[in-house]
Amino acid sequence: MNAPVSNSQGQLGSLLTSAFFVFAGVLTLYDTTGYTDRDSQVFPQTVAILLIITAGISFITRFLRPLGEDGFGAGVWWRRCLLIATMLLACFVMPYVGFLPAGVVAFVGGLIAAMHDKWTKSTVFLYLGAGALIMVAFFGLFKFVLLVPLP
Amino acid sequence: MEIGQFLSAMTPLNLGLALFGVIAGTIVGSIPGLTATMALAILVPITFSMEPASALILLGAIYTGAIYGGAYAAILLNTPGTPSAIATTFDGYPMAKRGDGDLAVALACFASVVGGMVGALALLFLAPPLSKVALAFGPIEYFWLSIFGLSLIASLSEGNLAKGLAGGAFGMILSTVGVAEISADIRLTFGSQTLIGGFGVVGALIGLYCIPVLIDLVAVPDRHLKVEGGVRSVRIGEAFGIAMKSKFNLFRSSVIGTLVGILPGAGGSVAGLVAYSEAKRTAKPHQKFGEGEPDGIMATESANNATVGGGFIPTLVLGIPGTPPDAIVLGALLIQGVRTGPAMFTQSGSIVYTFIYGLIIATILMLPAGLLIGRYAYKSIVTIPKAVLVPTVGFMTIIGTFAIRNSISDVVIMICLGIFGWVVARFGFKASPIVLGLILGPIAEQGFVQGWTIGSAINDLPGMFFGRPISQAILAFTLITLILPLVLSRRQRKSAMEAD
Amino acid sequence: MLRRSILKAGAAMALTMTFGTSAQAELNGPVNYVIPFGPGGESDISARLQQPFFKDKFGQDMVVNYQPGGGGAVGWASLNGLNGDGQTIMGINLPHIVIKPAQKEVGFTTDGLNAFYMFHFTPDAIVVPADSAYQTLADLVADAKANPGQVTMSGSGKASANHLAQIKFDKMTGALTTYVPFKGTGASTTALLGNQVKAQWGYTTVGAKQGEAVRMLAVAMEERHPLFPDVPTFKELGYDMVGGAYRGIALPNTASAETTQMWSDMIGEINADPAFRQQMLDGGFALLDVDAAGMADFMAARTVEYLNDAREAGLIE
């Protein structure tokens, strides 16, 4: 049913990922040419070569023997994106609005993304209230007990 | 080692500090992003007004609680609360997914207590001779140890050796990003100011483990963890029974943890990894490591708690901190006017022994406290609706990552790493090899460069790298780890083919 | 409520400023003391020694934070992005802050750091294990001359005080030793004790900490350290070497002149405390008193000196 689709998606993705790692190794090798000290070149070069070889092997074996696993799987995309987007957004607004408001952005985003059931009045109040409590508690813990300078 | 020191460890104040320390430490350790180092650094000023022994007991209790606490998030959220709990995710999370999370948490507690005891007893009876082990490990030994670690990573990547090694190699490359420690070069930053700080282990841990879990949680409507018939307290008894059956595993892993803890710079993550691999290598055929095998959790948790006691051995005997929390403890002692270094065991013996007894007591106290907190943690994670769990954990990752270096860019890096980790995990490159590569990378690099420098200086490179007894032993273990599974599986395949 | 008290404090400060008196310690809460290294090093220890005195004299907590990375570069690169309100300070180290920017684009410049006090230094010292064959410095030099490159010496980092000292000393003796860099003095001491190397380019603090387990062959001071009356100075033995790693504190450069002065006075007060001085000496440190006023000249002199040394050592062009 879905198997052929995820097969090719898995196949393509797996090959692309392996290719990415090979590329990362090559990039590292290229970067090492700019180092002035021999000592700082040795290790990255060795490890980059190891990476290229192993990622190359995984590329070749997957190419020759498509297994049909892997893939992004079933799952709702907009929820995933919403979660990540709000978290990143929170980071970017943090210097301007402070930690707690930014945290609220991330929290609400995550809440909406994770909420698969229908929203009712009680759940809205309950969840938002619980969320506010949790955020304030953590904020207090970090800022006043652990003395972390949260913006 | 007199009764007087034991009694002074049992004063109400010290008992109270031990209990408080264990509880506070467990909570700190369970929050990804909060490390024992952080908690200790904050609490050092409070110790100024205390007696040296009491201060040590408090700090030691927090340390041991934090190492245990890391298991909660590892088991229930697939995110190690501290780096030492990385190996606990291997079997902890699968156990939680199939509904055995409460069992896993209880097992982690028993194992941690056993491991902590073994480490503390080693500290009590064997500290001076064992400290020699710390000194015998030179740069080359560390280098081979990290190669051994890499081979363990590979051998744990069932059926996908190449991808596991690639992940590990990639993690090692990530560890080189930023200003090089051993030279003045700046590597792989591509001109970016933000990357000069490199990828911190804790931030990468949170990103690579936790974010993918969150992404997956929001995507499907299922509950996070299955629970059948509510939380049963009967499981503590069950856990105890399982623990008793695995006495040898517990003991062996604790010994491994103690020994690894003695090595300055190695840490709980390496200890857990080595103990887990050993447990897996000697597993009975019916045991399925990696799919929720109780012995797996017990191996890692006993090993990492044993590093607490083990780490104090070079700290107290030689004045060389085994791990960063040990360094903070040394600093606290220095301010108290306690002479650290070789003189400490002899000159300040009563303080040291009172502390060790206090550590033992704190470890014992961790049993009831840990089981209680564990049950509570399990209950809340399991019953809390996913819609609240996800944003809470997400918020926690943000605040936790920020607290590491007070840097928002660290949080952004963490999230980006998380997205990356999720994508590559979907195609066979798991998080653990990358994170372990990140941890082992600096150890490997420094060991290699230093060993190379010394070896070239004495014109005996081959002898340097291959001629030292400890290195040879580690190398042998590495080869066994890499070759044995291949040999065994080939033999299995052969016999399976012959049977057809 | 809080805002009002801050306003009040600000007004009070402004008033006292206009009357020309030195600023009162108007801190608003706990202070963030960022150490750009991991715990356990000399920077950490000296900060920890300051902590109780600070709390005692000025009533505020001094919270020590660690921001290791790049041998200090990560911390210093972030300094000027931190809040300049006087609540955050950062430890600084010479020669690191002079040499690192000269070598590469590390994200900060020597002049861009608002250093306001240099409060101690750890004099360079050659340390050997107690059971080493080297009884005097001459033994080590002789061995190095007879076997070029074979005398391995551990030290903390590259292009650091230890490394510079090793290069300088090699030039003076004409011998060739091999420098093996380690991550921090702790690691280089471990290597020494484990006999992985023959000697260590360390500091007097190593001698203080390790006590009977090590022997110092010489210290780079003008006169012998009070804690080690038996250890000769390099000068006595004919080598003009005085120096070590200097440590001080800086504020973000967005901090006001008053804030800088206030901090300079506070640290100066701690540094003048006899109990503090004794603790530092007992730890093997050597004290120094360069405050905000004298900082510019001090830094200028040191910069010239270190850049010169580094150039001769081939570490920079």
Image (cartoon, coloured by chain):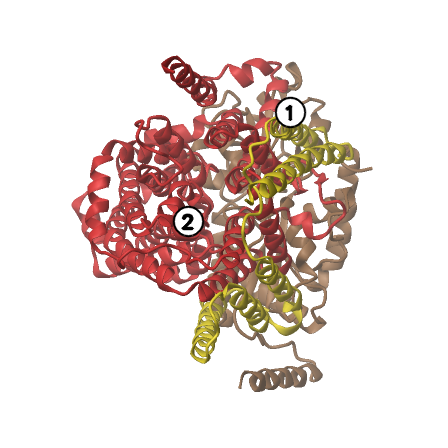
Q: Quadrant of residue B404?
A: bottom right
Give the class, few, some or many, for how many residues have Cα within 10 Å of label 2's Cα (few <14, many ≥20): many
Q: Is residue C168 left or right of residue C90?
A: right
Q: Are marks 1 and 2 on the same chain?
A: no
Q: Quadrant of residue C95?
A: top right
Up/down of C107 relative to C141, above or below: below
Give the distance between the C-alpha atoms of the residues marked 1 and 2, in whole angstroms.
Answer: 45 Å
Q: Position of residue A53 (x, y in %)?
A: 64, 26
Up/down of A118 relative to A25, above or below: below
Choose between A18 and B185: the one closer to the eye.
A18
The residue type indicated by label 1 comes to Thr
The shade of chain C is brown
Which chain is red in the picture? Answer: B
Residue farthest along the front direction in this orientation? A1
Q: Which residue is mark 1?
A: C178
Query: Is residue B320 visible from the viewing direction of this image?
Result: no
Choose between B139 and B380: the one closer to the eye.
B380
Q: Is residue B216 left or right of residue B292?
A: right
| Contact flag, marks 1 and 2 (Cβ < 8 Å) | no
Up/down of B328 relative to B152, above or below: below
Up/down of B394 relative to B121, above or below: below
Q: Which residue is mark 2?
A: B74
- Under tag 1, what secondary structure? strand
